[in-house]
Amino acid sequence: MHEISGKVVVITGASSGIGEATARLLAHQGAHVVIGARRLGRLEALASSIHSEGGSAVIQQLDVTDMEQMKAIIGLAQDRFGQIDVVINNAGVMPLSPLEALKIDEWNQMIDVNIRGVLHGVAAGLPVMKAQGFGQFVHIASIGAYEVTPTATVYCATKYAVRAINEGLRQEEGNHIRSTLISPGVTESELADSITDDETKQFMKEYRRKALQADAIAHAISYAIQQPSDVAVNEVIVRPTTSLT
Ligand code: NDP
């Protein structure tokens, strides 16, 4: 296995859940993590916790729906560390509801964050990686990138799109730049907090009872990053062992 130590890793949506756990693990393994999200206070607390354990973390307030802000975090990583080894497009939202509820603003929010946000990460990171001649994108999709379930139609559509983006990137740039899709099953995080539809919220409470710790996904990401440069881990699905969905 190649060391993660010294790698420069940009992580979007690092203020909670999977992004936070990944920042902690990779920093512990010696990476320089450049972490972004909208909640600056959360990022400050995370960076200070990483620093107190001897790790390297730089923070930047980030809304992934804004291309300029995505360019800014990539620019910050380059300025501080001279290169970018990995961009983890992790930020995502999941306000589930049945289609008939017509929560169009929430559909648009999912499209903006989960699809356009990922494309912004690619648009900001790809020119840098091409100039360097190396790099890796890690895209956090979902089991919803492989199957559609009621109330999750639009969310799944965004995750199918993330899977398509990862695969297209692999086909176009895979000779130098690695593309990795990590698809978690139910994982403990704040993701379901954004559900506003009462019935769906209630159902998801039950559905999400069997959940992985976010750290399990962080380890899958770490595995994909630490492979030798001629090994591309393209797709990984991680579910709780007891989950059949
Ligand atoms: P969380 O809600 O805990 O984390 C989501 C992160 O995304 C937060 O840090 C949030 O930070 C950030 N975020 C949301 N909107 C934006 C935005 N516009 N710009 C920048 N950051 C944003 O959930 P998870 O950790 O579970 O989610 C991480 C990824 O994992 C998502 O893509 C999700 O779809 C995926 N996933 C999660 C599963 C689960 O069961 N937990 C299962 C399958 C996939 P802030 O609000 O501070 O901006």
Image (cartoon, rainbow, N blue to C red):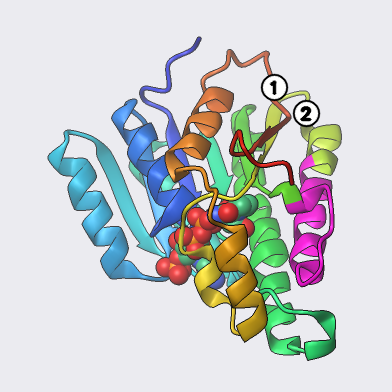
Q: Is residue 98 left or right of 238 when viewed as pictured?
A: right
In this rendering, is residue 5 above or below 55?
A: above
Which residue sits at x=32%, y=26%?
30
Please name the residue shown 36% across and 22% down the image: 5
- Is residue 182 covered in magenta? no
Q: Around disc 1, counting alpha carbons within 10 Å, would you say few (fewer than 14), some (14 to 19), or many (20 or more)? A: some
Residue at left offset 78%, top offset 33%? 173
Residue in front for this viewpoint, 224 or 142: 142
> Which mark identifies residue 163?
none
Residue corresponding to mark 2: 174
Magenta residues, as a range?
144-166
How many marks can you see?
2
Residue 79 shows in the view: yes
What amino acid is labelled 2 in the image? Gly
The x and y percentages for residue 145 are 78, 50
Magenta stretch, main secondary structure class: helix
Q: Secondary structure at mark 2?
A: loop
Q: Which residue is mark 1?
A: 232
* 148 lies left or right of 22: right
Instruction: Tell me the element at label 1.
Output: loop
Circles 2, 1 touching at the beta carbon (< 8 Å): yes
